[in-house]
Image (cartoon, helix red, strand yellow):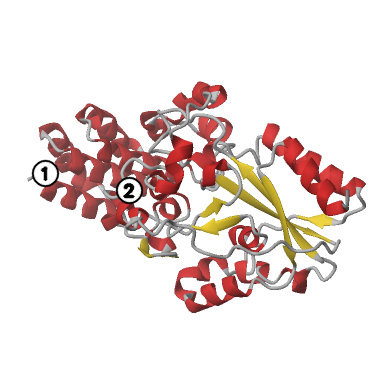
């Protein structure tokens, strides 16, 4: 068995869904796409993190001859219903900080490559989905996600892991194409609550629910709050409605007992009132795109989600947090949520708080009172 065959055999033996190879030449189609919409991608083209730089790996790593791409299936188990609609599935099983079994699988594969005398490097800037498509592992969906070509019943619940290697391996035939069935009437675009998917294979990140839950700065834009529903970290909406994902989702998968055991740590009322200790030790290790110093971002998201949940039983909690939270974005979002829930108790609390708030808070309270009236 040649090197390519040995690597493939070992990857599948370790539990990866698939493996493919492509050259380290620039990912020209990706570069063309991001350069055609610079206003949407400037936030990922900085000195610190730059996907344009990552799309030309050979320029930065002249020793790299090939890109090896692993496919990881992150939906092998059933996700807790308490977390569905609140936290995106891929984030619920992201082990990069907690270093569980999935992390060990990657370490074991890296060790194998080193035993083969291969120099390797993983760079997060390298466009993962485009690398996987050029390695023949996935096709694209209209929702911009990658879908498995082999295995996983063709679903998109996967992570692509591109790895630079110093060994020249025959590239696999690329599959940079749209794999959606012709009869699908743009289900993902129609289901995107914020209109982030504005055309097949076109997404505006600044409208995306996921982007706004962890990357957006300041208070969430008013026009996005209601469409964002109860999502507090990520979003799966376009994947949930996709017909290509239904065969996988309709399976009777085993329960993820570890996640079920910690689901209560992510209750919306718990997130809104959590201490820094709870955040750093129970929330952040699993959902670390939000800084450990930015607990207020989580609490603002939770306040907005509670408003969208529609349960007036949460009005007293929102009133209390609006009255004593040190961060104005959290207080202001509590005001918005109270306006959304309505009722005489919410109205009285908002009127009482109005004179004690700053500019942002007063603006949100006035808007909330208008909705209640």
Task: Give the mark, 2 or 1, whose residue is nearer the N terminus.
Answer: 2
Element at label 1:
helix
Image vertical order of residue 297 relative to residue 317, above or below: below
Quickly name the residue at label 1: 372
Q: Is residue 293 visible?
A: no
Quickly name the residue at label 2: 228
Tell me residue 218's x, y (percent).
40, 56
Q: Is residue 307 visible?
A: yes
Tell me residue 44's x, y (percent).
55, 65
Q: Residues within 10 Å of mark 1 (few under 14, many from 20)?
A: some
Could you say which quadrant of the image residue 288 lies in?
top right
Q: Is residue 247 left or right of residue 151?
A: left
Q: Is residue 12 left or right of residue 240?
A: right
The label nearer to you, 2 versus 1, is 2
Residue at image position (44%, 57%) is 180
Residue at image position (86%, 61%) is 167
Could you say which quadrant of the image residue 105 lies in?
top right
Distance from disc 2 to disc 1, alpha carbons, whole Å, reads 20 Å
Image vertical order of residue 185 relative to residue 53, above or below: above
- Label placed on residue 126: none
Q: Are marks 2 and 1 in contact (CB under 8 Å)?
A: no
Q: Residues within 10 Å of mark 2 (few under 14, many from 20)?
A: many
105, 187: nearer the viewer:
187
Look at the image and tell me in which quarter the C terminus lies.
top left
Residue at image position (69%, 32%) is 101
């Amino acid at each position: 068995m040649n090197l390519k065959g040995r690597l493939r055999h070992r990857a599948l033996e370790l539990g990866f869904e698939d493996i493919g190879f492509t050259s380290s030449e620039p990912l020209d189609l990706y570069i063309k796409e991001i350069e055609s919409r610079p206003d949407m991608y400037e936030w990922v083209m900085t000195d610190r993190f730059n996907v344009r730089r990552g799309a030309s790996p050979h320029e930065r790593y002249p020793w790299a001859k090939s890109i090896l791409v692993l496919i990881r299936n992150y939906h092998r188990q059933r996700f807790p219903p308490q977390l569905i609609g609140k936290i995106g599935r891929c984030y619920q099983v992201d082990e990069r900080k907690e270093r569980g079994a999935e992390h060990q699988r990657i370490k074991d594969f890296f060790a194998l490559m080193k035993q083969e005398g291969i120099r390797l490097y993983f760079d997060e800037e390298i466009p993962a989905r485009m690398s996987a498509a050029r390695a023949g592992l996935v096709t694209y969906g209209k929702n911009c996600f990658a879908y498995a070509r082999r295995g996983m019943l063709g679903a998109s619940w996967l992570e692509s892991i591109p790895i630079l290697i110093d060994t020249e391996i025959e590239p696999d035939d690329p599959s940079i194409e749209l794999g959606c069935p012709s009869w699908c009437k743009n289900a993902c675009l129609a289901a995107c609550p914020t209109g982030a998917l504005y055309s097949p294979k076109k997404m505006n990140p600044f409208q995306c629910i996921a982007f706004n839950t962890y990357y957006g700065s300041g208070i969430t834009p008013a026009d996005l709050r209601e469409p964002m529903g109860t999502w507090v970290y990520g979003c799966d909406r376009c994947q949930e409605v996709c017909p290509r994902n239904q065969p996988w989702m309709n399976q009777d998968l085993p329960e993820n007992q570890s996640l079920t055991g910690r689901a209560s740590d992510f209750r919306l009322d718990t997130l809104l009132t959590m201490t820094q200790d709870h955040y750093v030790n129970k929330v952040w290790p699993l959902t670390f795109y939000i800084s450990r110093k930015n607990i207020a971002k989580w609490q603002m998201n939770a306040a907005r989600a509670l408003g969208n949940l529609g349960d007036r039983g949460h009005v007293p909690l929102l009133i209390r947090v609006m009255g004593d939270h040190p961060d104005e974005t959290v207080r202001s979002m509590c005001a918005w949520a109270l306006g959304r829930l309505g009722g005489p108790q919410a109205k009285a609390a908002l009127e009482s708080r109005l004179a004690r708030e700053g500019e942002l808070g007063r603006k949100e309270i006035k808007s909330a009172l208008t909705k209640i009236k």
